[in-house]
Amino acid sequence: MNLKDIKTVSERKRFIEDILSVKLPHIGNFSLDEKMASSKNCENMIGAAQIPLGIAGPLKIQPTTHNLQPTTYNPQPTTYYIPLATTEGALVASVNRGCKAIRQSGGAYAEVEDVGITRGPVFQTSSLKQSLEFKKWLDDEFKNIQNIAQKTSSHLKLKKLGTRIVGKYVYVRFYFDTGLAMGMNMATIATTEVAGYIAKQIGINCLSIAGNFDIDKKPAWLDFISGRGKRVWAEVILPKKILKNTLKTTAQNIYNVWLGKCLLGSIMSGSLGFNAHFANIIAALFIATGQDVAHIVEGSMGVTTTEIIEDSLHVAIYLPSCIVGIIGGGTALNTQKESLSILGLKGEPKDGLKLAQIVGATVLAGEISLLASLSEGSLANAHKKLGRGNYRV
Amino acid sequence: MNLKDIKTVSERKRFIEDILSVKLPHIGNFSLDEKMASSKNCENMIGAAQIPLGIAGPLKIQPTTHNLQPTTYNPQPTTYYIPLATTEGALVASVNRGCKAIRQSGGAYAEVEDVGITRGPVFQTSSLKQSLEFKKWLDDEFKNIQNIAQKTSSHLKLKKLGTRIVGKYVYVRFYFDTGLAMGMNMATIATTEVAGYIAKQIGINCLSIAGNFDIDKKPAWLDFISGRGKRVWAEVILPKKILKNTLKTTAQNIYNVWLGKCLLGSIMSGSLGFNAHFANIIAALFIATGQDVAHIVEGSMGVTTTEIIEDSLHVAIYLPSCIVGIIGGGTALNTQKESLSILGLKGEPKDGLKLAQIVGATVLAGEISLLASLSEGSLANAHKKLGRGNYRV
Amino acid sequence: MNLKDIKTVSERKRFIEDILSVKLPHIGNFSLDEKMASSKNCENMIGAAQIPLGIAGPLKIQPTTHNLQPTTYNPQPTTYYIPLATTEGALVASVNRGCKAIRQSGGAYAEVEDVGITRGPVFQTSSLKQSLEFKKWLDDEFKNIQNIAQKTSSHLKLKKLGTRIVGKYVYVRFYFDTGLAMGMNMATIATTEVAGYIAKQIGINCLSIAGNFDIDKKPAWLDFISGRGKRVWAEVILPKKILKNTLKTTAQNIYNVWLGKCLLGSIMSGSLGFNAHFANIIAALFIATGQDVAHIVEGSMGVTTTEIIEDSLHVAIYLPSCIVGIIGGGTALNTQKESLSILGLKGEPKDGLKLAQIVGATVLAGEISLLASLSEGSLANAHKKLGRGNYRV
Amino acid sequence: MNLKDIKTVSERKRFIEDILSVKLPHIGNFSLDEKMASSKNCENMIGAAQIPLGIAGPLKIQPTTHNLQPTTYNPQPTTYYIPLATTEGALVASVNRGCKAIRQSGGAYAEVEDVGITRGPVFQTSSLKQSLEFKKWLDDEFKNIQNIAQKTSSHLKLKKLGTRIVGKYVYVRFYFDTGLAMGMNMATIATTEVAGYIAKQIGINCLSIAGNFDIDKKPAWLDFISGRGKRVWAEVILPKKILKNTLKTTAQNIYNVWLGKCLLGSIMSGSLGFNAHFANIIAALFIATGQDVAHIVEGSMGVTTTEIIEDSLHVAIYLPSCIVGIIGGGTALNTQKESLSILGLKGEPKDGLKLAQIVGATVLAGEISLLASLSEGSLANAHKKLGRGNYRV
């Protein structure tokens, strides 16, 4: 017998148990809708991994006042309990403390710009000359390309495209609005149609529908500079009292750590992440809410800033590429759907923006707490107390 | 009542259910050892996220012949079933096909170099002059520093250090051998002791024990160039017949896509990932086996190469920073431990190297399959068939 | 007496000779228009450095057929003798050989897109919220800003602007058409006026009129990705015979070197220059023609591509940021003006585009020749024969 | 008649004048030693470009106290007049002002570490397995390789090597001490010998003696992180009075501009240059003193830091890759030799370190002055007054 001939999750699990002489009772213990998970999310499924899920918060977010979007998605101050799935001891506790500091400071202000998900195919022409002509054709044909793309789904809009040429290679970056979905699949299907249209109209061949000009799940300055998915910002001013009582530090101490670590340290490392630990918070939120976990890569990029204002501290974060959705991917799985319900996100039209906003504010909480810990020298202690695994040091 | 006053997972879950008027039966349905998970991995725990777990393989790995390590850790050809936890439809199927192609081609060759986990504190001096003197002192004192560090754990060795100076800031990158553990916590504790020693001996202040010169969970050229955790390579030669029958493509077609996408596409994007989708495979393996998921960021960096040899195709991958462990972190959790048992990793001295080797060979399988799909234009179709979520297009 | 009290070049030279007991007869031997040079190009002038100037060519350039510009600037095939000022032995000979190969292959095709010179001030606001409002205001006010900018010079047009926000910092990248001038000074003056307008209208302070978002004279992905000054491309197909007779190599040999060096080598180095030696050619042409030599930095970025077509080799180059002018800067100095006259550039409206085109084709010649040398192992020999300085090895 | 058949500079000039109907009296007016220049520095020479040369200073440098080198090269405070060859109006004046501020503040402290010039060939093996074996062989054979290399010149020492592997490609970075010479030619010759030795011993082919792992004349994180040529640092503390009287600004104003421009601005641009304008100073000094001008690219990388200490300002610069020599290249040409004599560098054993030190301190002067200008809004004015070319705005 062979893996591919097995049709059910439990038989497949048994096959693995038998052939390897292992026991997998916990992997086999799950309540996910097996039919959905095994057909839409995971082939050759044998069960599920369980990731501990904790709660940080409540996290208070101020209403948005400047709207990068046509309509307001957050007209009232809101508070959220944040579901975080992680195996890294001390992380939830740390974010929780950051949420407390933000709450005590009146809440975070956070905003979202929907740049659009991108797909970046590469085309191969017969000459540089043809490459340049192709670029012009793409610009002239934009309306038709848009129509072709948008016929593939009523949930997808082609917002714009950008072209870059190197010799016979033409890279096109398509930006799509994909509504509540993260949208990579929709974008791929639409781009495939567009590529077919191009081939038919002018005979130029699409070498790869994904030409690393998206650029997907790889750290890249293009995503940092041009944005991808959603751009997210958040800020808060922490008064002296809260810095002292809740964060056990001072504005000056956090500022010094921030400058030496997030700016100069990352500069000396040749990094695209000028922050303390965006990736930790992104990872925990993405696992909990059914996002594509490999998009942590994009989420690790970005900048934290701090400024001392008298004895208070202004802290802000900027996420150039936050890639989230609330339908599609893993969002319909049972535990993930429950995490979205904890956040009150049930699929309303603006819930995608809200999720990005929550990500931004939670990332801000994480930055505040870790920078505070580092500035008072408590990181190692926190790990000693909370995060030690089952090995003796 | 307040979150922090609640002591058990189930009460905490109920509190969230009540306060938000939501139902969390699935998050509450888990078999993880609650005491361990809630004390060591996740504060404020209310349950667990379930991530579908599938199997790819078997994946055949050739014995290592050149040892970057003192002793051979893989003297026989071995085959593995690979546990992958993911919500991204088509991923397991894709890796599975790559494993098949590798298996049919006689197995992958994969090697690991243990660079060591790093911690990179930043120190602040009183002048550039003192910074330069401090660098010299660090070099002269290396033996003593090593002793201080190694007193913190019998499982930790300080391998070397590197220093960089910019004005009054001195960045030191400590490389640790941490045995079977990923080791960041051990490294942090050891570095904290060393920082204390430095302060006592010469009065130079550690501004931040984590100075982004580690550099941890942020994409960075320093990790790409100098390595972090383990460097991993893998290669295979795919004969024409397997390219045709299993992968539905040709050597030339894959080569063309690779050149246009993984090299030139990533170049045009300003990326550190010259590959097809390392991050996807890393993510699925890391979730399954209890790794620190934010280390996907480091794992997304690296290079795939291909070369046509007559009608065959040589494919190789290089992961400059693969950060894994088999004790500590999430590895002791029940489902994660089971995934490690699927891989036959029970904590033997060389099992950390083996895990890195498996990661490398699986990443190779993933690259082969996706590049093949792209080269025959089947990516969108695969997503249409396997990966579509529960939304209508 | 003191340097600043001296009014003439010769007295100043004498002062230095006397105070340091040195003789400077050669620095004192120059024919530059002293009044112009000492007032517009170089304060505290004591004379001139002499840089040997050689000729490569003729270099044949095909007519442009696809125009990224509104009108054709090169309707006929043209040939140029290229003035190169350099102290690096073997460089002129190498470029000369590249020109020969291109000439024998029918000439290079080269194209230019005038992206515009940029100035990128940084503004400081009172909050992230205000930063976001400011961005919107900038977009809404574009017409007025354009008017303000364009009042500062009849030779300047503001083409577009791009805004990026991080916390309280707002970066605006203004793109200017500055006619025949390289234009940084014009751009600075216009930006200063715009900053004054902004301050008056909405009270937001310009922290620095040059906020490294230009980004000027520093290697940066922003310039690579978004372009700065002019984008330039060139290509040629080298037939087998010319590869053999003129370049002493084969298509395959050059291709192999290119792949291993310009792509994979630069990838492993974390570079923005995926080429053999753009900077050498840019440097020699820039010194000869009076460009701002520090713009070699931007000119070192870019990509060379090659492809084997049967026994021929397609070679192309892409310069994302070629910053040149034919008026202003050093272009009016006597020897520099003569170099421009060698290129036939006397200030006609399209001569700026032509100069960029010549730079592109000359860079192509340089790439061809060096890659050929490397592929036949002759680099060290060339240096032994031609480039050895006055020291014994 | 044809360019290559002409033997003298004047005949060649006449040929160009005739064929193009241009007059080149100024290019023809030079006093460089024609025989040396035309044989060692510039083939097809027709004359020389004249670059205006001005003087900044005196610049005071404090004695070095911490020696990264075995012996002290600067035991006494020294003052230098700095020769700067430039066509960019306002540059010399700006550096001059920086020198004054440094002088008034007691002089700059500057240090140099001689990392060594690098050559980075790429080798191609038959498999990843062989690549790994080759790396081990290189480490084992280091002594022999060193001997081979050092036989090519009594002025050259092979300091160390570093190896990186990707598939069948092996990159080796050789670090050479080349005494007073910049050393690229020596390094190339030595590397060629080593490559021959490798081919003979183990049959592994050097694909390209320059494999962009040097990495030469291209911006690259490898050079930033690992250093190339010389690492240089400099610092000074500017008291309040000098900030006010000489620089017309305050510590706080410079600090604010620095943070917004050199750090956050360069971060937002994806740059490797976290400074105000290193490249300008490097360019002017390199042209004046006969350096390889394309090495401005490496010199544009680096970091400026500032810190407010009460009302004073600490300013420091870090140049990770300063590539200079005082013999070889253009240094023997007449005007260039005179510039070196202005600096008192006549070829003494430590003069190479001294030149790097002077570069560092002059770069510091340039940073101080431009940051001061920007912080008081005077950049545009300076350009209006000093830098305007011969065009009307």
Image: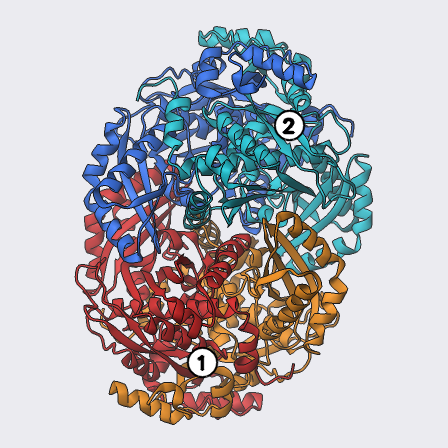
Chain colours: A orange, B red, C cyan, D blue
Residue identified by numbered label 1: A54
Q: Position of residue D3 (x, y in %)?
A: 56, 19
Q: CA distance from mark 2 to mark 1?
A: 71 Å
Q: Quadrant of the N terminus of chain D?
A: top right
In the picture shown, does residue A132 fall above or below C156? below
Rendered location of residue D279, percent (x, y): 53, 33
Mark seen at residue C80: 2
Q: Residue furthest front?
A: C241
Q: Position of residue A15 (x, y in %)?
A: 32, 90
Residue A349 at x, y percent in the picture: 69, 79
Callout 2: residue from which chain?
A: C
- Give the letter of the chain under mark 1: A
Quadrant location of the C terminus of chain D in the rendered image: top right
What is the crowding at mark 2: few (fewer than 14 residues within 10 Å), some, or many (at least 20)? some
Q: Secondary structure at mark 1?
A: strand
Amino acid type shown at disc 2: Tyr
Q: Is residue A17 visible?
A: yes
Q: Crowdedness of circle 1 by 10 Å Cα count: few (<14), some, many (20+)? A: many
At x 35%, y 32%, the residue is D188
Q: Is residue A89 visible?
A: no
Which image quarter: residue B303?
Answer: bottom left
Please give left or right for residue B164 compared with residue D149 in the image: right
